[in-house]
């Protein structure tokens, strides 16, 4: 069962708005929602992009099939980012309040501790798992704080991209800190 109607209602968007924004007729979208007509692959992608959800979620594919698809097709960072947000929303983990943000910050700290342990023990699998888990917890924390982690990353890169400095004893020191 697809989730077209459910996602549209959650986002409080009318059929008319979807039609105007996507160029797909409201009647056709209604047929998609009632499963009287099946969208083409390009249309699924267009609607998933419009609603900012993974195509597999929008189509209502079972988790086992989604995992199979994910094994056969590598997702982009952006697709993973959206899938993680959707996963957290589905589990009511993102409430955008101080209490849940503090709880999520504790998870970030916990994952960084596991990463430290993996690095200290030179455990490659633990390091990979902890890096991935750290990213997941940061994406959820950013969403809980009403920030887009990709936007935060872009801003950070724009700050460092022209930065000059030196590596001393394995740590990068900004040029401005070298003169102090």
Image: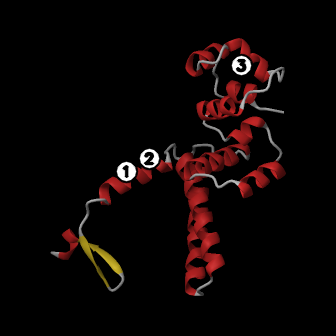
Q: Residue furthest left?
A: 179
Q: Nearer the viewer, residue 11 or 5?
A: 5
Please give the residue where the numbered disc 1 appears in the rendered image: 155
Is residue 130 found left or right of 175 in the rendered image?
Answer: right
Name the residue: 61% across, 58% down.
136
Q: Is residue 93 visible?
A: no
- Upstream in sequence: badge 3 or badge 2: 3
Q: Nearer the viewer, residue 63 or 118?
A: 63
Please give the residue where the numbered disc 2 appears in the rendered image: 151
Name the residue: 64% across, 27% down.
11
Alpha carbon distance from label 3 to label 2: 31 Å
Q: In what element is the residue under mark 3?
A: helix
Residue 100 x/y as whole percent: 61, 51
For the residues carrying marks 3 and 1, which lies nearer the camera in this image?
A: 3
Name the residue: 58% across, 86% down.
122
Q: Residues within 10 Å of mark 2 (few under 14, many from 20)?
A: few
Q: Are marks 3 and 2 in contact (CB under 8 Å)?
A: no
Query: Can you say which quadrant of the picture contains the C terminus?
Result: bottom left
Indicate the quadrant where residue 22 lies.
top right
Is residue 171 found left or right of 50 in the rendered image?
Answer: left
Residue 1 x/y as whole percent: 84, 33
Q: Residues within 10 Å of mark 3 (few under 14, many from 20)?
A: many
Please give the residue where the numbered disc 3 appears in the rendered image: 29
């Amino acid at each position: 069962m697809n989730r077209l109607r459910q996602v549209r209602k959650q986002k409080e968007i009318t059929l008319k708005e979807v039609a105007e924004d996507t160029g797909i007729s409201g009647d056709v979208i209604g047929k998609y929602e009632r499963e009287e007509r099946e969208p083409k692959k390009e249309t699924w992608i267009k609607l998933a992009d419009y609603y900012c959800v993974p195509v597999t979620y929008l189509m209502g594919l079972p988790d086992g099939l989604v995992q199979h698809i994910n094994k056969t097709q590598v997702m982009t960072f952006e697709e993973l980012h959206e899938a993680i947000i959707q996963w957290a929303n589905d589990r009511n983990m993102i409430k955008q309040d101080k209490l849940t943000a503090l709880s999520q910050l504790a998870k970030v700290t916990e994952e960084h501790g596991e990463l430290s342990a993996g690095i200290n023990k030179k455990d490659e699998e633990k390091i990979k798992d902890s890096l991935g888990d750290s990213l997941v917890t940061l994406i959820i924390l950013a969403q809980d704080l009403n920030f887009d982690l990709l936007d935060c990353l872009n801003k950070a890169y724009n700050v460092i991209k022209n930065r000059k400095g030196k590596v001393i004893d394995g740590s990068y020191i900004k040029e401005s800190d070298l003169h102090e």
